[in-house]
Structures are given as C-alpha cells and as structure tokens.
Amino acid sequence: MSEPRRDPTSTDEFIKGLWKENPVFVQVLGMCPVLAVSNTAENALAMGLATMFVLVMANAVISSLRRFIPKQVRIATYILVIATFVTVVEYVIQAISLDLHKALGAFISLIVVNCLILGRAEAFASKNTVSRSVLDGLGMGAGFTFALLCLGGVREIMGSGSLFGVDLFHEGYQDWVIMILPSGGFFTLAAWLLVFNRLKARRERRAAVTAEVMS
Amino acid sequence: MTEDPLWSIFLNASLINNFVLAYFLGICPFMGVSGKLSTATRMGGAVMFVMLVSSVCAFGINWFLVAIDAPYLKLISFIAVIASTVQLVEMFIKKMSPALFRALGIFLPLITTNCAILGLALFQTNRGYDFVQCLVYAAGAGVGFTLALVLMAGLREKLDLADTPKVVEGSALALLVAGILSIAFMGFAGLGG
C-alpha cells in the first residue's frame, strides 16, 4: 500500500478502492463471501451493499475512537464494533426480504470475519480522520461490490442464462450448471484474476517502453 | 435435522459438504498456508483443535442465550468468546506442553478470525444439534478442512516444479486447482444419504 507522494485528495481515496487497490482482484482479500454468495447477481449485490455498510460504519466509529482505544486490545475492540454493525445488518435484511436472508444464510453473520473489514480498520481507519476513513470505506466497499457483481453476473449468465432474474436467452439455452456449483466460483474468480494479471502485465510493459523512449 | 445419525453428520461435514470446497469457509488460510505439506498438516491440526474447543463454547453460549432470551447477542458473544478462548488455550498449551506449542506456532492466534471456526459455530446452532452431535460435527469439519488443505499442499508442491506461464502464477493458478479439487469432492455427493 504505497502512499502517493502528494497529499491524496478525497476523490483519490474513493477511486483507489474501486480500481487500483480493488480489495478482491488486486489485494485478494475477503474471498470467502466472494465465492460463496456470488451464484446470482442479486445475491452478490446484496452481499456487496451489506459489506459496504458495515465497512463504512466500522471505519467511522473506529476512526473517531482511535485516540481512546488502547493498542493492546485494539483487535478485540475492532471485532466487537464490526460484530455490532453486522448484527444490525442481519436484522435489517431479515426485515426487508426473508428470501434474501435465506439465500445469504450464515454468510451475513460471517461478514464479521471478513478480513477486508478488519484489514481496513487496522491499516486505514486507525490512522486517519473520520471523513477520510468514511471515504475509504465507501471506495473499498464499492470496489468489493463491483468485484462481487463481476463474479455474480458471469456465474448467473452462464449458469442459469439470466441476469438479475431476467431471462436472457429464452429456451434453447443449455444451463451450464457447474458455474452455479462451488467449483464454478473458483473457476470464475481464477478467470477474473487472469484478466487483471494480464492488464497489469501490459501496463508494466507499456511503462517500461515509455521509460525507454524518454531516456 | 436433529435426527441425523452421528456417522452421517461426520461424513457430511468432512466430505460431502466440505467446509473449504463446498461452503468456501476458511479460504484465506487455505490459500495462504497450502504452499508446503508440513505446514499444511500442522495448520490442519491446529484448526481441528480450535474447532472442537469453540464448538463446545458455542454450544454453551447458545444454551445460555436461549435461557436469558437474547438471541441478538449471539454473534457478538460467539466471536468474543471464541477469540478469548483461543487466547486462553494458547497460554495453557504454552505452559503445559511447549513442544505442542512450538508445533502449532503462529497458527493458533491466526485461526481466531478464520471464518470456518465462526461458520461452524453458526451452522451447529442453526441446525439445532445436541452436544454430542456438535462434537462430531466439529470433528468432521476439522477432518475435512485438514484433508482439503493437505491435498492442496501436495498439488501445489508438484505445481512448483511445473513450467507454468507467467500470467497464471500465484492466486489464479491456486484457484484453478481448488476448482478442480472441488469438482472431485462433488463426487462424494449422495454418500451416506
């Protein structure tokens, strides 16, 4: 996580989570929910928004309390703060849609142990002001949601021929069932990581060529 | 669900619905420490041990929370109690058996925030298992986790010798292998009913 030399503006805080430091594709954090609930685009979106809410709220609280939390017990404190907000989210989802609550199941509660949230609390919110921490949470949450949607979209289109429950191919499409099953999650994520590795390699090659021309 | 025979619970947790390959729990340590066979085995042992301990704790907490009618405290108390129990167990082992402590090493504190542990605690309460069933379920989950980890480590040790293209190196390749492993585990579906 290299800090840029100039003071980052608030837009930078937001954008970096979305693309350059995307939590899933670049940092490979928080894989469990990414793989587990991305079998349809709708589940993926709900999970992404829930995680984003917890991330923003936990970042805000931890960052405002950062001067009062003793260093020795900080991890335990972070976990308690996160668990509180996860409980809130769980009851809210249950109130909004029981079907969604059933589909996501225990994975809503498991947001607590999502390494992404604890990681941001430790690496960012404990050192920065409240407003920047909130922006960081928003950016990282948006990046996480984006990654989940990438996976969920691909898996739903291939596995059941629809997107957000809307039938895309009508009859005549043979469902690729394996994409809905657990192994499909592994394959789709591997494929996305390949795409990102490819992009990164190309950018580095271009940068090298530009440097050569410049010198 | 509570009528399941014990052997069926065990098979279900270890093979059919393997925690790593079917529920995607504990992917982080699965990817992180599956590089070497010896580390993978020790990590598996540590996870199995913590699973048994936290399963007992979770059973106790759940009983207590139901008694005082406060189910909304479930998540917070689970995570807090599991984390502190692991810490306590760590100190205990350090005092009683330094050899075992060295063998488990850094893995013990790491697995506190492993989603497989909390997942196990949540699943067993959701399914309403009794005490013995909980223990068997935890043992099955631990065996399944170790099995997946050891298999993966063996595969990755072999992969290190192979000549792979540069783009797929790292997590992408590991995920592809995990996907194939997961297909293999789907073959267990239907085993034991």
Image (tube, coloured by chain):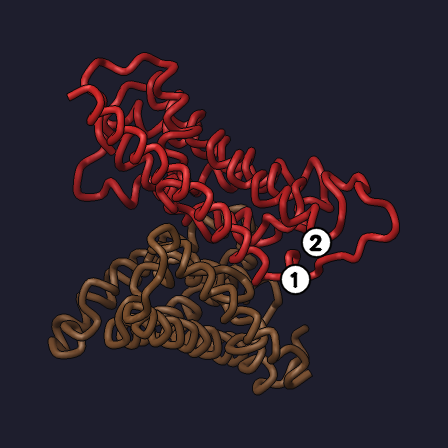
- Residue B111: x percent and y percent? 32, 61
Letter of the chain in red: A
Which residue is at a point 48% across and 78% down the rendered structure image?
B140
Which residue is at a point 55% across and 65% down the rendered structure image?
B22
Which image quarter is the N terminus of chain A in?
A: top left
Query: How packed is label 1: few (under 14 Cα within 10 Å), some, or many (20 or more)?
Result: some
Q: Which residue is mark 1?
A: A178
Query: How packed is label 2: few (under 14 Cα within 10 Å), some, or many (20 or more)?
Result: many
- Residue A178: x percent and y percent? 65, 62
Q: Are marks 1 and 2 in contact (CB under 8 Å)?
A: yes
Give the chain of mark 2: A
The circle drawn on residue A159 is 2
CA gap between label 1 and label 2 equals 7 Å
A165 lies left or right of B44? right
Q: Amino acid at mark 2?
A: Gly
Which residue is at a point 26% across and 35% down the rendered structure image?
A123
Please say if A25 is above or below B97: above
Q: Secondary structure at mark 2?
A: helix
Q: Nearer the viewer, residue B169 or B133?
A: B169
Which image quarter is the C terminus of chain A in?
A: top left
